[in-house]
Image (cartoon, coloured by chain):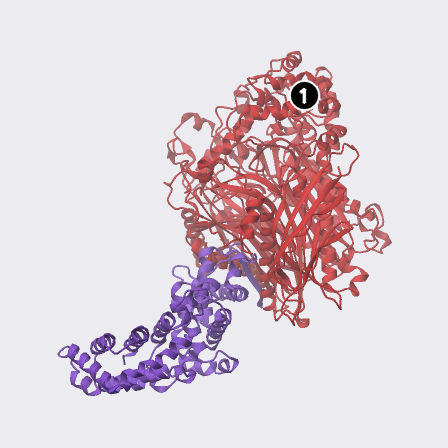
Chain colours: A red, B purple
Amino acid sequence: MPGKLKAKIVAGRHLPVMDRASDLTDAFVEVKFGNTTFKTDVYPKSLNPQWNSEWFKFEVDDEDLQDEPLQITVLDHDTYSANDAIGKVYIDIDPLLSSEAATVISGWFPIYDTIHGIRGEINVLVKVDLFNDLNRFRQSSCGVKFFCTTSIPRCYRAVMVHGFVEELVVNEDPEYQWIDRIRTPRASNEARQRLISLMSGELQRKIGLKVLEMGGNAVVGYLQCFDLEGESGLVVRAIGTACTLDKISNTYAPASAINPCNSSPSKDTKEAGFGEEAPGVPLSSGPPTPLRAQTFSSFSPSKSYSRQSSSSDTELSLTPKTARICLSPSSPTLQSKSSPIPTTKALRSTTPPPLHVSQSDTAMLRKSVSFSEDLLLAASGMGSGGSAGKEAGPLKALLRQQTQSALEQREFPFFTLTSFPAGFLLHVGGVVSARSVKLLDRIHNPALGNTRSYKLLDWNSFTADEPETRDAWWEEIRQEIKSHAKALGCHAVVGYSESTSICEEVCILSASGTAAVLSSRFMQDGALDMDHRLSRQQAPVFTSGTEKGEGDMGSSASLGFEDLAPPGCGFCHIPYDELNMPFPAQLTYCHCCRRFKVPDVLFTTIDLPTEANVTGKGCLIQARLCRTKKKAQGEGNATAISNLLPFLEYELHTQLMNKLKLRSMNALFGLRIQISIGENMLLGLASATGVYLTPLPSPGGIQIAGKTPSDITYEQHISNMQKKINDTIAKNKELYEVNPPKLFTLDPEAFRCINTELVEEVIGSPIPEPRQRSRLFRSHSESSDEVSELDLSHGKKDAFVLEIDDTDAVEDIHSLLTDAPTPPGFYSCNTEIMPGIYNWTSALQMFTSVRVFRLSNVNLTNQGLNKVFNDLCENLLKSLYFKLRSMVPCCLCHLNFTVAVPEDELIQVAVTAVAMSFDKEQTLENGRQSCDKTLMKAITENEEQLQFPLELTAESSSNPLSSAKGLSEVSGALPSARAPSVDYSSFTDRCSSWIEQLRLKAHTIRRGSIKTMSSLEKASPLPEGRSRSLRSNRSYAGGSVAVVKMTPLSFIPGTKIIKYLGIINMFFIRETTSLREEGGVSGFLHSFIAEVFAMVRAHVAALGGNAVVSYSMKECVFMENPNKNQAQCLINVSGDAVIFVRESELEATPPQPQSASTQTSSSGEGT
Amino acid sequence: MTMELDVFVGNTTIIDEEVYQLWLDGFSVADAVKMRLENGALGECEVSGEVLHSDTMDQYRTFQMCERLLHCPSKLANQLLFQIPAHHQAMLIERYYEFDHMFAREVLGKKLSKGTKKDLDDISSKTGIALKSCRRQFDNFKRVFKVVEELKGPLAENVQHHFLLSDLLAKDYAAVVFFANSRFETGKKKLQYLSFQDFAFCACQLISYWTVGAVDNMMDDMDVDLEKEFLHDLKDLKVLVNDKDMLDQHKSLVCSQLRGRIRVFTEMEANFKNLSRALINIASKLTNTKDVRDLFIDLVEKFIEPCRSDKWTAGDLTLFLTHYTSTASTLETYRYQVIWERYMGVVKSCILKMYHD
């Protein structure tokens, strides 16, 4: 599909003076795309030139359209010498390639120079005409939408979630090419910027192809990262979740949905080889239920099919709108197997599974399909789904085979999403993470050259297999993650992310996510197969999908307690088997439904599900750690790091746990552990949002134990500390409004559910006896063996005990207590939503703050370092609170810390977050509710269309088989698999990969023994009717420049996103050779960050947008050389450009997408 | 162990008005932090000096980066670098161009040249205004002067249009520009008692009534210069003192009007001829640029001081000047009513404004 790219240069303004004599500039513009260059006329002697050029037309391949940026260079004409460059603008034209996004790019762009920064602005118009190309072997993937947002974008609904997509490309870093020695810094920087722009374009195109192959039309949770590996090159890698999205029409009128569905050529279907399903197509014309029929496509289209569908690029959606009905081969089996296998839990067996559809035999199913009732079956992919459904007999064997092969085929059941359509997330197992240390350098040691040698290939020769090498590295880590998830009885990993930290030639690759059980509703083939596998092995439980309207029904329904299990606790129920747990955990019955077991603490990397039952508010919890390391080179360095990693992680975990308890909370969301390596230290920073999940048991206090009880003064000291801790806990309880509902109710029904074990516990020990205090803190021999980590908490402990046996422990407790409380009026979290706050105003302030700290004292101890690092983070937070004091009451959301060790004695911390005010008064008009309602409406609308008579879900909590197997895999397979290898990576692989959930254990004490409360009280204490004021913010029409809001969140409170205009992914380099003159390093970086913001805003405005959501600064690499008066900085930012309208306006007037032209005219007024 | 780098950048530029004022006043970061701590305006937020220092540095950097834009305030509205809410933009501009009257009083009527700029440290030490702040204010004067000097149209409006200032501030700037252009003498010892506001008022009067633009709102309206023709015509007023009959007649008319109405009647009666001659002489000499510059010193020396030594009250003066002006118009042989009123109107209000201790 070739296209014609058209660009027009309109005018410039505020140009710099290039001719000292006249104080003016003779400017002209070069417009370059690919290898074609056009020039405008010279506009003499003006700082505000009006070129008003013709349309420059580039006829190019769509492949190039995706890869290349449009490059605009503004120059000063010089008759006698070479023309001087004023600056450049790179415009990513990808948003124009998707018909659903922007149609024109038009507006003022800052003219950027890598040495001088922004130098004036230029007004540009860009359009693209695409032609249809039915070439099925094309390499482009125009039209696949990309979203940074890690949830289903607000104005779309997920028809299907296909799964994980990843890709990476490798290139030589221009900065390290020989030519860099002779070219100017400017030329070098520009080469780099251009290269990275090209590489991200290529990466996006390749991922797009994969998505099309999977049959999707969008990538959600797209996360692109750069690894600047120095000498060994430049890696650009990306992961995301392929989805099929459907735009939610504003009216929800069935008619509007039918049209595209009918107009979509049914040829697609046939070519896909679905002849059998063809009869299902007319179903969409059935008047009573047209929507239901057309929105769900559960089949994995074959390759040829996907190519076909993608060729209809300019159409609204790449999803075929025809209904697909496929039979799941496994469904009949499940039914037949359901009765013979008795569930292990008495509780479960007592409740009759509401098998609505189970009695129907295969034939009936077939029939129902062909008669096109609104009966859609979740299908297992595998292409042969349809026919497989018929044989019910040899299914068992067949299925086993199928699932195994499916597992092999479908590499990773990973999802980069952090929040999910209602009903998608069934259970959460816990955090799974894996790390691996790799050596980027050439290894000459022949002894290493065995099986693993491919990893250690010479990186300096840029051979074609490099991406494969990198792929292999990541593959390895992902496999590990997958096996961890399996050990937790989960078939999927959600909230998945990957990161690296590079120092010289050592590189840590990290991946983490949350093991989870997902509903098969939005899934297909591989993932679904796993579903089947799990459910096959376990006691199958059936879903009654028929009358679902509610958000959370998915989980509850899948458990078969549709009417009993309250929504909002389902995801807490353990997915693993109670009797054969992968790690020792303290299970109790869910405090909400009292039917299922829940763990005592839950760590996750995802956002708090909206339906979750939360008591009180949440807060940011950080664990910070600094470890010194001897300077070393190459292998030695890698080994040293590998050896340190497990200790680092263990301590981070301990800190997190302590801090969580100190706040009386029992769950962490959005956990992100970052480990950064430097020459002589390792930094670890774990951030998460702590909450009190109502279904989970209340956390016990923290007990301090002294080592020498005889010493009276010491005892006193201890008791003082204990008192302090208790006070802090009490204070925190008040601050975060954590008043957990009492354990016991008078409701006999509920009481019956409470395990006797629990009662015992309560009677047992209100306060632990000193003798029983077991050492937990530092008592454990921190071997690098994973098995021992599994065993951190053997036996029962009555309280979380900290034993003070050395100064370290004292320090730790001190640091525990020195976390300054947030000032009044402030809350903070690192997730999207702050539980307990609903009445947001529209006032928001996104900000980035960067600090670099120099450790002048080289001989710092670990303790000293820790304190420095801790203070650095604490002071940064304090500073933020102070700066934003005018917004009180407000919440800092999505507080995202990034640490780095740029040089020997430097620690760099960068934070990007958004401050959002909220109204204290809760009586105002109920804005959020209505917002949610509309969302819910959309979702439920969705649901209705997606009703399945039969839902295949993995209910894994009663499966001894899989868990046992998983466990043995974890404990056995991991070390053994890597033992023979001499590879350095393997050390850490083994040591550092650990399952978060295999955590320190402790009992919770319920000092209050038996307390009673009415069953009413046990309901979620969240006032449902809370509201957010719709007080429309004073519109700060900053002169003639359109205001563009930026936020790291996926939404802007009080507004509705009506259009996604495309992804913003920008990379900038700034360098200076006059650091002092620019105000030192701070002045330099300050203006650079401001410039980056300005350029992002300008691009969004030019696309016709008024906000960036899911904004993030992925990279901020800062290097300085004060002696030479030089500094350089690289920044990579990304986000989704959107158009939003205020809800108040939305109600008043029908939403009108602001056209780009109006934006331009308004921003053009200034001239 | 030092903080090497510390920046905070908001998508919407955060501006603390208090810190902005400290910056404008020319305080160093350290002093500003001290002042902020002392002010205790930070209220409940218990903050350390460290936090304050970091915040102050951020703010100062922001202001420094904005300063370039503030030199051409219209740029502030359509620049892309900072996203500043409109009300903050207006505040930034207004405060940046605000000046200390003490400082303006010192510079008033001086040539806005490099030479004067060199003397700023004297002014700084005399007024107690930080040198930095003096420089900013001086540069503002110069910048505004340069821009509006050659422009046609009403002076204050020009200033307002180009620098987006408030009415009041634009008027003050008009006065500064007017004084700088005509280089009125304001520095003499005898004039020291006059404040900037006194002069600004006089300048406003002069601009409104004595310039070309005052009579003729046409295109080629120039507000900066006094109308040459008018100044020339003022020579004709001499008849009022040169013609003895007329002088006597004028005196008797004024006396008859004021008898019993002012306390200093006898002094007035005795001094009438001197006073009248002083005012007319000032008028007739205004054709010389030098004498225009001396307008205010002349008014003080020749008129205000004699009155003051006779202990005239402001009320006395008002009555006298009112009747002095009006009765002259009734003189049968007096043919210059228009010029007379145009002259006396301004002189009267200027004198009244300047007549204080």
Q: Is residue A851 above or below residue B317?
A: above
Mark 1 belongs to which subunit? A
Nearer the observer, A1111 or A367: A1111
Give the residue furthest to the left.
B260
Q: Is residue B191 visible?
A: no
Q: Is residue A468 visible?
A: yes
Q: Is residue A454 above or below residue A949?
A: below
* Left or right, residue A81 beside residue B349: right
Nearer the observer, A941 or B159: B159
In the rendered image, residue A724, in percent from the top left (x then y), is placed at 43, 55
Please rate how many residues cluster around mark 1, counting C-alpha atoms within 10 Å: few if below 14, some from 14 to 19, many from 20: many
In the rendered image, residue A1081, in percent from the top left (x then y), is placed at 61, 66
Figure quadrant of residue B284: bottom left
What type is the residue that disc 1 sits on?
A: Ser
Residue at 17% across, 81% down: B255
Residue at 40% across, 27% down: A747
In the rendered image, residue A852, in percent from the top left (x then y), is placed at 60, 62
Q: Would you name the residue on which mark 1 appears? A: A328
